[in-house]
Amino acid sequence: MEPTAIQITTVPHYLAERSAPDEQHYVFAYTITIKNTGPQGVQLMGRRWVITDGNGKIMEVEGSGVVGEQPLIPPGAQYTYTSGVSLETPFGVMEGSYTMTLDDGQEFQAPIDPFRLALPNIIN
Protein backbone atom coordinates (compact mmCIF):
# COMPACT_ATOMS: atom_id res chain seq x y z
CA MET A 1 0.00 0.00 0.00
CA GLU A 2 1.20 3.47 -0.76
CA PRO A 3 1.84 5.81 2.18
CA THR A 4 -0.44 8.25 0.33
CA ALA A 5 -3.34 5.96 1.30
CA ILE A 6 -2.80 7.27 4.84
CA GLN A 7 -3.95 10.87 5.31
CA ILE A 8 -2.61 12.61 8.41
CA THR A 9 -3.97 15.93 9.64
CA THR A 10 -2.56 17.88 12.56
CA VAL A 11 -4.15 20.57 14.71
CA PRO A 12 -1.72 22.10 17.25
CA HIS A 13 -2.68 24.54 20.00
CA TYR A 14 -0.90 26.36 22.81
CA LEU A 15 -1.75 25.46 26.41
CA ALA A 16 -1.29 28.75 28.28
CA GLU A 17 -2.57 27.28 31.56
CA ARG A 18 0.22 24.62 31.57
CA SER A 19 3.00 26.93 30.38
CA ALA A 20 5.43 29.13 32.32
CA PRO A 21 6.95 31.63 29.87
CA ASP A 22 9.04 33.23 32.65
CA GLU A 23 10.78 29.85 32.99
CA GLN A 24 11.10 29.22 29.22
CA HIS A 25 8.47 26.48 29.45
CA TYR A 26 5.87 26.45 26.67
CA VAL A 27 3.40 23.56 26.41
CA PHE A 28 1.56 22.65 23.23
CA ALA A 29 -1.07 20.01 22.53
CA TYR A 30 -1.64 18.55 19.10
CA THR A 31 -4.56 16.52 17.82
CA ILE A 32 -3.79 14.14 15.00
CA THR A 33 -6.26 12.33 12.77
CA ILE A 34 -5.02 9.38 10.73
CA LYS A 35 -7.37 8.31 7.94
CA ASN A 36 -6.95 5.05 6.05
CA THR A 37 -8.06 5.56 2.43
CA GLY A 38 -6.44 2.33 1.23
CA PRO A 39 -7.93 -1.10 0.54
CA GLN A 40 -6.32 -2.86 3.56
CA GLY A 41 -6.49 -2.34 7.27
CA VAL A 42 -3.40 -0.91 8.95
CA GLN A 43 -2.01 -0.94 12.46
CA LEU A 44 0.03 1.94 13.81
CA MET A 45 3.04 0.21 15.39
CA GLY A 46 5.37 3.10 16.19
CA ARG A 47 6.19 6.76 15.86
CA ARG A 48 9.23 8.92 15.28
CA TRP A 49 9.19 12.66 15.89
CA VAL A 50 11.79 15.33 15.16
CA ILE A 51 10.97 18.45 17.19
CA THR A 52 12.92 21.66 16.59
CA ASP A 53 12.48 24.64 18.92
CA GLY A 54 13.01 28.31 18.08
CA ASN A 55 16.67 28.09 19.12
CA GLY A 56 17.32 25.28 16.66
CA LYS A 57 17.52 22.67 19.44
CA ILE A 58 16.42 19.29 18.07
CA MET A 59 14.73 16.55 20.09
CA GLU A 60 14.05 13.13 18.60
CA VAL A 61 11.33 10.94 20.09
CA GLU A 62 10.72 7.33 19.09
CA GLY A 63 8.43 4.77 20.59
CA SER A 64 5.81 2.13 20.07
CA GLY A 65 2.29 3.22 19.21
CA VAL A 66 0.76 6.53 20.24
CA VAL A 67 -0.71 7.50 23.64
CA GLY A 68 -0.23 3.93 24.85
CA GLU A 69 -2.10 2.35 21.94
CA GLN A 70 -1.28 0.59 18.70
CA PRO A 71 -4.59 1.24 16.95
CA LEU A 72 -6.02 -0.83 14.13
CA ILE A 73 -7.48 1.39 11.40
CA PRO A 74 -9.76 -0.47 8.95
CA PRO A 75 -10.16 0.72 5.34
CA GLY A 76 -12.19 3.93 5.25
CA ALA A 77 -11.84 4.49 9.00
CA GLN A 78 -9.89 7.06 10.97
CA TYR A 79 -8.20 7.31 14.35
CA THR A 80 -7.79 10.54 16.32
CA TYR A 81 -5.67 11.21 19.38
CA THR A 82 -4.26 14.17 21.30
CA SER A 83 -0.80 14.39 22.80
CA GLY A 84 1.55 17.16 23.83
CA VAL A 85 5.07 18.52 23.90
CA SER A 86 6.89 21.22 25.83
CA LEU A 87 9.47 23.58 24.36
CA GLU A 88 11.91 26.11 25.77
CA THR A 89 10.83 28.67 23.14
CA PRO A 90 7.40 30.08 22.17
CA PHE A 91 7.54 28.40 18.77
CA GLY A 92 8.91 25.33 17.05
CA VAL A 93 8.24 22.73 14.38
CA MET A 94 7.37 19.02 14.57
CA GLU A 95 7.58 16.42 11.85
CA GLY A 96 8.04 12.69 11.69
CA SER A 97 6.56 9.40 10.60
CA TYR A 98 4.45 6.49 11.76
CA THR A 99 5.50 2.89 11.25
CA MET A 100 2.43 1.10 9.94
CA THR A 101 1.77 -2.59 9.31
CA LEU A 102 -0.76 -3.76 6.73
CA ASP A 103 -3.17 -6.65 7.26
CA ASP A 104 -0.85 -8.76 5.06
CA GLY A 105 2.14 -8.03 7.35
CA GLN A 106 3.94 -5.53 5.11
CA GLU A 107 5.45 -2.57 6.96
CA PHE A 108 5.77 0.98 5.66
CA GLN A 109 6.44 4.50 6.88
CA ALA A 110 3.65 7.10 6.75
CA PRO A 111 5.26 10.57 6.76
CA ILE A 112 3.91 13.34 8.98
CA ASP A 113 4.37 16.71 7.30
CA PRO A 114 5.99 19.48 9.37
CA PHE A 115 3.60 21.54 11.46
CA ARG A 116 4.20 24.66 13.49
CA LEU A 117 3.86 25.01 17.24
CA ALA A 118 3.51 28.68 18.14
CA LEU A 119 1.92 31.03 20.63
CA PRO A 120 -1.12 32.72 19.10
CA ASN A 121 -0.17 35.90 17.22
CA ILE A 122 3.59 35.39 17.67
CA ILE A 123 4.12 34.74 13.95
CA ASN A 124 2.15 36.72 11.40
Image (cartoon, rainbow, N blue to C red):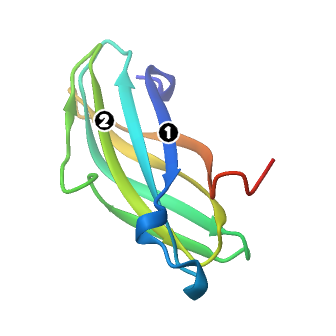
Q: Which residue is depicted at the point 65% across and 74% down?
A: 89
Q: Compare residues 4 and 59 and report the one nearer the observer.
A: 59
| Residue wearing tag 1 | 10
**Residue 111 position within the rendered picture, expressed as x and y whole percent measured from the top left:** 52, 41
Of the 4 image quadrants, the one containing the N terminus is: top left
Q: Is mark 2 on a helix, strand or loop?
A: strand
| Image side of residue 11 versus residue 122, left or right | left
Q: Going by the image, does 41 lie left or right of 118? A: left
Q: How many marks?
A: 2
**Which of marks 2 and 1 precedes in the sequence?**
1
Looking at this view, name the residue that lies furthest to the front. 17
Looking at the image, residue 80 lies above or below residue 55: above
Spatial CA span between label 1 and label 2: 10 Å
Residue at the extreme bottom of the image, as rendered = 23
Look at the numbered disc 1 and give the secondary structure of its residue. strand
- Which residue is painted at 26% across and 52% down in the image? 65
Q: How crowded is mark 2: few (under 14 residues within 10 Å), some or many (20 or more)?
A: few
Residue under the image location 65 percent in, 62 percent down:
92
Name the side, left or right, on which 41 lies relative to 91: left
* Residue topped by disc 2: 80
Q: Where is residue 55 in the image (x, y as percent from the top left)?
A: 73, 76
Percent position of residue 31, x then y: 40, 43
Numbered circle sitting on residue 99: none
- Amino acid at circle 2: Thr
Task: Give whichever of 15, 2 is nearer the camera.
Answer: 15
The answer to whether marks 1 and 2 mark residues whose Cβ atoms lie closer than 8 Å is: no
- Residue 102 in the image, given as x and y percentages of width and height: 27, 30
**Residues packed near mark 1 inside 10 Å, few (<14), some (14 to 19) or many (20 plus):** some
Q: Name the kind of residue labelled 1 in the image.
A: Thr
